[in-house]
Amino acid sequence: MKPVAENVWIVDGPLIRFGMPWPKMSFPTRMTVMRLADGLFLHSPTALSLHLKKELEALGSPRWIVGPNRIHYWWIPDWRDAYPSAQIYLAPYIHEQSKGRINFTAHALSSTNGYPWDQELITLPIEGSFMTEIEFFHRASRTLVLTDLIENFELCRLNGSLMRWLTWLGGVQDPHGSMPRDMRMTFLRNRRRLKTAVEQMIEWNPERIILAHGRWYEADGAQELRRAFAWLLG
């Protein structure tokens, strides 16, 4: 676990292979942990190890386990088994996407409020034609937690020219990380809604932005949003 701000940590997990049948890309994974008044909030859980379990339990008890979009769910069953009293919250279509891996009921994660963490976190669903991604803003530390809305792959961690070309083509290469171009296509019909959501996040004036894939932004979060979504904001 790596400290990010007061009561906020990240956990960098293993690489996963993801994409079309060919070519597949190696994606780094990242979990965000936030300590709230009533327990730990786990965003996009990565692989669970005994060492990580001990680190977490030194901070508190996992209370909420969150799958923030339809493709971030793989390790949630492991965490559910380890912490059966924790509440599971899942973004739309995770059950369908998982093809049976998520075979248990969970709380829906699709609205802006009505959650036990409302006093400490702002919840912002952003709906596209393929998936709805749920963003979170930690009020106390001004930390914005995204999943795939921005990706920012570092060249030094990319293996081979194909990976460098794919990340450049997708518009997700550090230091110019942004919303992947294929993901942008799924928001064509919801472009106005996406713009409104981005403007809302800029208004929050985040100090930092945590991403699930690639280098995250330690400072000037609002400015990084303006840069990453310049194609949308005009």
Image: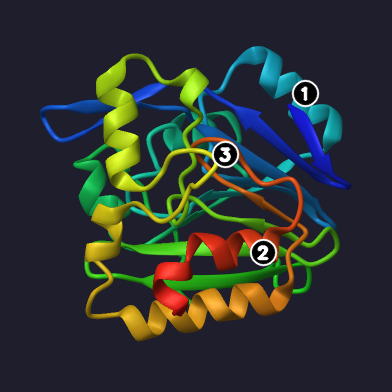
| Quadrant that contains the N terminus | top right
What amino acid type is highlighted by mark number 2?
A: Gln
**In the image, what residue type sits under mark 1?**
Glu
Q: Nearer the viewer, residue 21 or 110?
A: 21
Give the quarter of the figure containing the C terminus: bottom left
Whether residue 195 is situated above or below residue 134 in the rendered picture: below
Q: Amino acid at mark 3?
A: Pro
| Residue ID at (28%, 71%) | 187
Q: Assign a secondary structure to mark 2.
A: helix
Judged by depth in the image, the label closer to the viewer, 1 or 2, is 2
**Extreme residue in the left direction:** 21
Residue tagged by mark 1?
55
Distance, label 2 to label 3, CA atoms, is: 40 Å
Q: Residues within 10 Å of mark 2 (few under 14, many from 20)?
A: some
Q: Quadrant of residue 145?
A: bottom right
Residue tagged 3 = 84
Q: Which mark is residue 6?
A: none
Q: Is residue 95 above or below residue 120?
A: above
Q: Is residue 114 visible?
A: no
Horizontally, is 27 left or right of 79 in the view? left
Q: Which mark is residue 223?
A: 2
Task: Please state the horizontal and vertical placement of residue 105, each as a whole percent of the image.
Answer: 38, 54
Mark 3 falls on what kind of element?
loop
User: Image check: 196 left or right of 70?
Assistant: right
- SS under mark 1: helix
Q: Nearer the viewer, mark 3 or mark 1?
A: 1
Q: Determine whether 109 is above or below 3 in the image.
A: below
